[in-house]
Amino acid sequence: MKILFCSSEVVPFAASGGLGDVAGSLPKSLNAEGQDVRVILPLYGKIKEKYSEDLKFIDSFNVSLGWRNQYCGLFTMEQNGVTYYLLDNEFYFNRPNLYGYGDDGERFAFYSKAILESLLHMDFEPDIIHANDWQSALVTLYINVYYRHIQKFQKIKTVFTIHNIAYQGQYGYNMIADTLGLPQEWAHHAEYNGDTNFMKAAIENADKVTTVSPTYAQEILDPWFAHGLDPILREKQHKLWGILNGIDYESYNPKTDKIIVKNFHADAFIKNKAVCKKELRSLFNLEEDGSPIISMVTRLVGHKGVDIVVQAMQGLIDKGYQVVVLGTGESQYEEFFRDLAARYPGRVGVEIAFIPALSRKIYAGSDMFLMPSKSEPCGLSQMIALRYGTVPIVRETGGLKDSVKDSQDGVGNGFTFANYSADELYGACMRAYEGYQDTKGWRVLVKRAMQSDCSWKNSAKEYIRMYEDTMKLW
């Protein structure tokens, strides 16, 4: 199958979160399974600077957007066996950041329409166009409104993936005519509760709607998780698939990772993981004793569960845990952890920053990894922790529930709790603490964690099954 994968961010070119990781890994894994997956993204200024010698110009054309008529350049490059197409417009994409501008709706409406227009200028005819999150959601609508009469587009199917339903591309109603340029008879596809809603348009128009874990696919049918979109999702539930993300096993590999102080793997980890723990203690000035280290690498915001961590933290320290925290976020939580580190030197280490290299050392050197999110569409951190033999403690939501199973049954790979409460979080941490005291049993659990399959291989096969099912439609 030939698939055009649309993403506003792609590792290693540009990324702000999990979407970039998926767009950087999944196409590569699908190609390894015999598919022809190509990726199309904006040509941000920083990409142009770094990869200018690799970019090959294909063509230029204009894109109509409401009353606007904007230039678009089409470039291509190849990396790691994947063909990338990059859409150039200096006004929209030559900016310091990916998002956060007052005209983001216009910028990514242009991106969505330019994707379809670019197909008229490239030697590639996809069977499926796969859009991701609100930034490319309008591809699924624009193809039906403006392009179905063209032979090249008549058989193309569309897939839309919701990576995080909290970000929907919501704008004022007047954007439908002024910016999107939709004819009146199509306006209701992009309208929701009196506003323009990019994601709603994709749910209406895509042939398949997927999410990044099976549990999240069920959760977003519930008003508590859906941020207002549950009625339309229940109506279109027949389109919905949940496929758990994976992580890049080449990048996240404790056996070859050059960042960590000592390499290890599932069949030989005891001695070298202990060396990584010793280095982590040194980095955060923690006492050298027999305490387990529990860590968090996270955005310090409420929906990541930081509020219940704050409530439980005193009990964890009193019990004997050492704590390591890396992240930035809301000022109240940043101040809490700074104060905690000041009050408990040698027991608590905190770095209010985003430092990818340090995060690797934390994954490798910690004993447990805490991830008590209110909601988590998929989550990658718990999978990285498993890969590095750091036992995750998670709340049973979204991809956390799908990737971490409680070890009480003797076959699980971590510790879980169901309800969003500090008491249940604390209880799961206490069970982990007791498990840690059984040295032999803990080593069995660590090995089981490292042997968990969080690679893209299984996920890629499930995506192929979904694509094949999509191809059978109409």
Image (tube, rainbow, N blue to C red):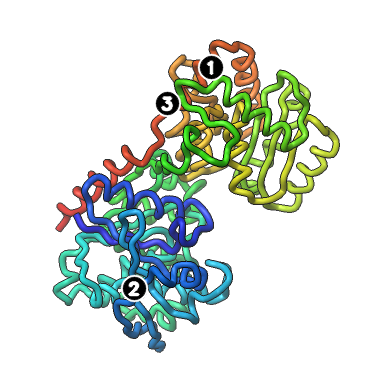
Task: Measure how far apart labels 2 and 1 are at the Cα level.
Answer: 51 Å
Q: Is residue 10 left or right of residue 153?
A: right
**Disc with the residue nearer the chain's start (2 vs 3):** 2
Q: What label does residue 443 carry, if any?
A: 1
**Residue 328: x %, y % from top left:** 68, 51
Look at label 2 and name its amino acid: Lys
Q: What label does residue 451 carry, if any?
A: 3
Most foreground residue, 165 or 452: 452
Most foreground residue, 396 or 108: 108
The secondary element bearing badge 2 is classed as strand
**Residue 231: x %, y % from top left:** 40, 54
Q: Nearer the viewer, mark 2 or mark 3?
A: 2
Please rate how many residues cluster around mark 3, counting C-alpha atoms within 10 Å: few if below 14, some from 14 to 19, many from 20: some
Q: Residue at x 43, y 18 (%)?
A: 411
Task: Measure how far apart labels 1 and 3 are at the Cα level.
Answer: 12 Å
**Residue 279: x %, y % from top left:** 67, 32
The secondary element bearing badge 1 is classed as helix
Q: What label does residue 56 carry, if any?
A: 2
The answer to whether residue 171 shows anywhere in this view is no
Name the quadrant containing residue 109.
bottom left
Look at label 1 and name its amino acid: Arg
